[in-house]
Image (spheres, rainbow, N blue to C red):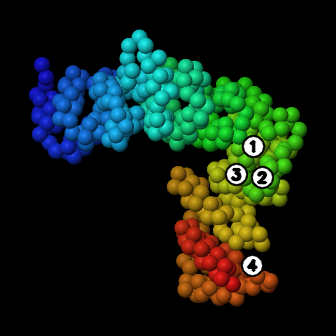
Amino acid sequence: MSSYQAIIDRATFLSSSPERVFELLKARASVGHPFYGPTNDDEALEAASLNRREPLINLGLAKYCLCEVTARKLFSVAGDHDVILAIRLSVLSNEVVGRFLLRAVPLCLFEGRDQTARLTTWLAAAADEEIAALFSNPKIDQSFLRDFLECKEPWEAVSDERRRNALSALERNPRMKTPYSSNVMDGYAEYSYNSVFDAAWSLAGKVPVTPMWANALHALFEQLNPRSHSLKKPMETAERWRRDPAGANESEDEAQQCAKGWLPPFASVRKELAKLELGAYASKYGDLLASVDPAFRCAAYNRGRLSVEEIAAAYAKDGKLFFNEAFRNRHLYRDEITRKALHDVAWDIATNKDNSHLDAPNAFNYMKDEIAKEYPDWFREEDAEPADPEKVPATKGDLNELAEAIGNYNPYGLAFQQVMQSLKTLNTRLGWIWWFSLGALVASSLRHL
């Protein structure tokens, strides 16, 4: 017998507009029942809603249904019509179906003894959009995902290109960088959750060493939780990722790319694996910092606790490459002294004669503001400083001085340095967003001279 509330709910769903039902389904999905799954009443309500045959209601059910049977019915509808494709994509991105039974998409969409065979058959023929929707789902079934990343049956069902597309979607999946967290003490659940990270890191030792795979792996590894992996010797795995199999010298192309301030894909994979080594063995920091391989040095720039002297030496050695890795290093923002050293590096890059943009100061200011929101205690001394003439809001006179410097610009004189010095003076007076417009002003003026 249905409860009185279930009867009321069903009547509400049947008498409401499709727009209202969509919102009701969305609200219903946000209410969790951690220890039991959907009831017969839930299944009856979804079946009644499905029988209305309203496209918007079907879309709402696809995104927010709780019952596997509802998801399977919607997912099994064939056709290439845009609405049908949207419904299938919504089912694949559904974060609540099957969550109570610990069997989420895609496993909950296939039943019977031949479940694995049917799943792999679908995966082999799935549209690119379906691959993207499935692997972007934060609640994707972790046993399926682990098997895929361990190169088992689901992996074997698809081509190299589809595998890389799946990794590209995982790169954007917040699940891949979120540490395990639960109010319930469950060692197996924690192990299962973390085993997905381990399987992903292990791909570095399995997939072909090609530029396309290097692109796919380094993009994923940059987002991947680094704390759970079983790689015994990450540095040995890193050596696999070289254009020169002997690893004796960096290729000319790689060296040229590093000189421009960016690690190419092969080197980026090595860097991410070296960061695992640094995370496991803090004593390796000095070796990485002194390495002849720029990828290994970048691992130290990105994760190490550099001193002011080390910042100066690293910048002298690697220039923009150092900054592009170091400005994301949270350790360098914790102390006012290293923060100031990194700030000065950013402005030195901006005032270099080979540059006419403010990308480095913008990046520094943006990162500093983001970290300050998360760790305000790190910036208390800075916030408590007395009023400083250089830190008051910019005035019209300041901007007039800047405009005059721009107007007097002579590509064969020294006025360019005056322009950049004016900008540097205004650095702490304007929010970082203003630098985009200021940079555009400078660039536009220079182009018309």
Label 1, on which residue? 267
Q: Quadrant of residue 384?
A: bottom right
Q: Are marks 4 and 1 in contact (CB under 8 Å)?
A: no
- Quadrant in the picture for the N terminus: top left
Mark 4 vs mark 2: give the one in front: 2
Q: Which class describes the residues within 10 Å of circle 4: few (<14), some (14-19), or many (20+)?
A: some
On screen, residue 176 versus residue 88, left or right, reads right
Where residue 258 is drawn, which disc sits there? 2
Mark 3 vs mark 2: give the one in front: 2
Task: Identify which amino acid the numbered label 3 is placed on.
Answer: Glu
Residue visible at 68% across and 26% down? Answer: 206
SS for callout 4: helix
SS for callout 2: helix
On screen, residue 256 versus residue 10, left or right, reads right
The answer to whether any part of residue 399 appears in the image is yes
Q: Are marks 1 and 2 in contact (CB under 8 Å)?
A: yes
Q: Are marks 3 and 2 in contact (CB under 8 Å)?
A: no
Residue visible at 67% across and 74% down? Answer: 424
Whole-angstrom CA distance, mark 3 to mark 2, is 11 Å
Whole-angstrom CA distance, mark 4 to mark 1, is 35 Å
